[in-house]
Amino acid sequence: MKNIGEFAQSRVEEIKKLSIDNAGKEYRSLWVAINFAVVKDSYIKQISAQAFGIFMVIRAFMNNKNNIAYPALETIANLSDCSVSTVRREINKLEKYGWIKKVGMKRNKKGSFGNMQYQILQTDLIRGSNQPGFMKKPLVNMNNGK
């Protein structure tokens, strides 16, 4: 039987091998809750369903520490099944209506500029993991069907 030190060392080596084998396969566990007001108060109608989908793709890349995301336009286009030009247009719409804000380009490891950084501004209606609850005062007009 191995002593505790030998067991711990073999386990550390096993975990190192697994991390090397799985490099690049990390997935983020993300849940998002959408306030009823997004639908009922016509927020999606205001920006369009396509812009909302693009927002959700960008939102999936958000850093919860400072609400910044910087996915590549090509990544957003691929994940939302839109063209890059459509993504650009819808991002401009999201910025116009105050859902996101462009905050500059991210520098890559070589020091040159890479992807645009987006600050997620719309956090009252759409929450993700590790964020406080929804807004205190409901926005919803409870007239059913109107």
Image (cartoon, grey):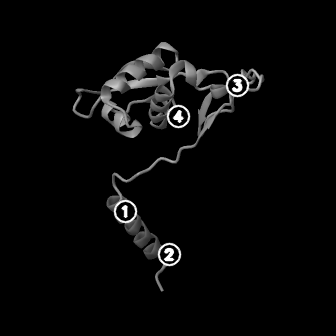
| Circle 1: element type | helix
Q: In which quadrant of the rendered view does residue 110 lie?
A: top left
Q: Which mark is residue 16?
A: 1
Q: Earlier in the sequence, mark 3 or mark 2?
A: 2
Q: Earlier in the sequence, mark 3 or mark 1?
A: 1
Q: Residues within 10 Å of mark 4 (few under 14, many from 20)?
A: some
Q: Are marks 1 and 4 in contact (CB under 8 Å)?
A: no
Q: Which residue is mark 3?
A: 135
Report how far apart the C-alphas of labels 2 and 4 lie in the structure. Answer: 38 Å
Compared to residue 137, the image places residue 12 above or below, namely below
Report how far apart the C-alphas of labels 3 and 2 lie in the structure. Answer: 51 Å
Q: Residues within 10 Å of mark 1 (few under 14, many from 20)?
A: few
Name the side, left or right, on which 81 lies relative to 120. Answer: left
Q: Earlier in the sequence, mark 1 or mark 4?
A: 1
Identify which residue, 1 or 101, lies in the foreground.
Answer: 101
Report how far apart the C-alphas of labels 2 and 1 lie in the structure. Answer: 18 Å
Instruction: Give the residue at x 53% y 21%.
Output: 121
The percent coordinates of residue 76 (x first, y second) are: 37, 34
Which residue type carries mark 4? Asn
Report how far apart the C-alphas of labels 1 and 4 lie in the structure. Answer: 27 Å
